[in-house]
Image: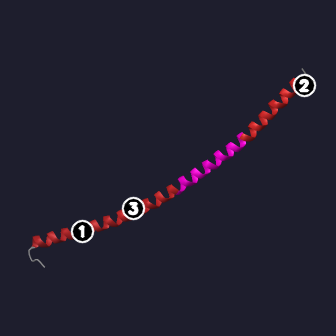
Amino acid sequence: MPSDPHQQETLAVLREIRDQQRAMLEQVSAQRALIEELVKRSRESIAESISLQKLAVDRQRAITLFAMVGIVGCIAAILYLVIRYL
């Protein structure tokens, strides 16, 4: 052990700095784990949102197709009635 008071003070300050750096590294590690969890949740949420949007688009296509068939059928019936009674 150094006997000089300045050296002892310097060592104490360096140990304190080291301990504070270790504590900060632990905090950063914990924050990183939290951020990774949040990113994972975000990706899962985005994937679910995309799948729901695809499902909605597929349903909209089916409804549109059904409506178009109905509209064409109505137009055909109207044309038939118009031609029949002319």
Where residue 85 appears, as percent x and y from the top left, is 91, 22
- What kind of residue is marked 1? Arg
Q: Which residues are magenta?
A: 44-64
Q: Residue at x 26, y 69 (%)?
A: 19
- What kind of residue is marked 3? Arg
Quarter the C terminus occupies: top right
Q: Which label's residue is closer to the chain start, 3 or 2?
A: 3
Q: Which residue does the numbered mark 2 point to in the structure image?
A: 84
Judged by depth in the image, the label closer to the viewer, 3 or 2, is: 2
Q: Which residue does the numbered mark 1 point to in the structure image?
A: 18
Give yes or no for contact between labels 2 and 1 (Cβ–Cβ under 8 Å): no
Q: Residue at x 64, y 45 (%)?
A: 57
- Residue 57 is covered by the magenta coloring: yes
Q: Secondary structure at mark 1?
A: helix
Q: Secondary structure at mark 2?
A: helix
Q: Which residue does the numbered mark 3 point to in the structure image?
A: 32
Q: Would you say 39 lies left or right of 23 here?
A: right
Judged by depth in the image, the label closer to the viewer, 3 or 1, is: 3
Where residue 16 appears, as percent x and y from the top left, is 23, 68
Q: Would you say 25 lies left or right of 8 here?
A: right
Where residue 77 appears, as percent x and y from the top left, is 85, 31
Q: CA distance from mark 3 to mark 1?
A: 21 Å
Q: Would you say 63 lies left or right of 49 here?
A: right
- Residue 43 is covered by the magenta coloring: no
Identify whether 53 is placed above or below 80.
below
Give the crowd class for mark 3: few <14, some 14-19, many >=20 residues within 10 Å.
few
Most extreme residue toward the left is 4
Q: CA distance from mark 3 to mark 2?
A: 77 Å
Q: Residue at x 31, y 67 (%)?
A: 23
- What kind of residue is marked 2? Arg
Identify whether 32 is placed above or below 15.
above
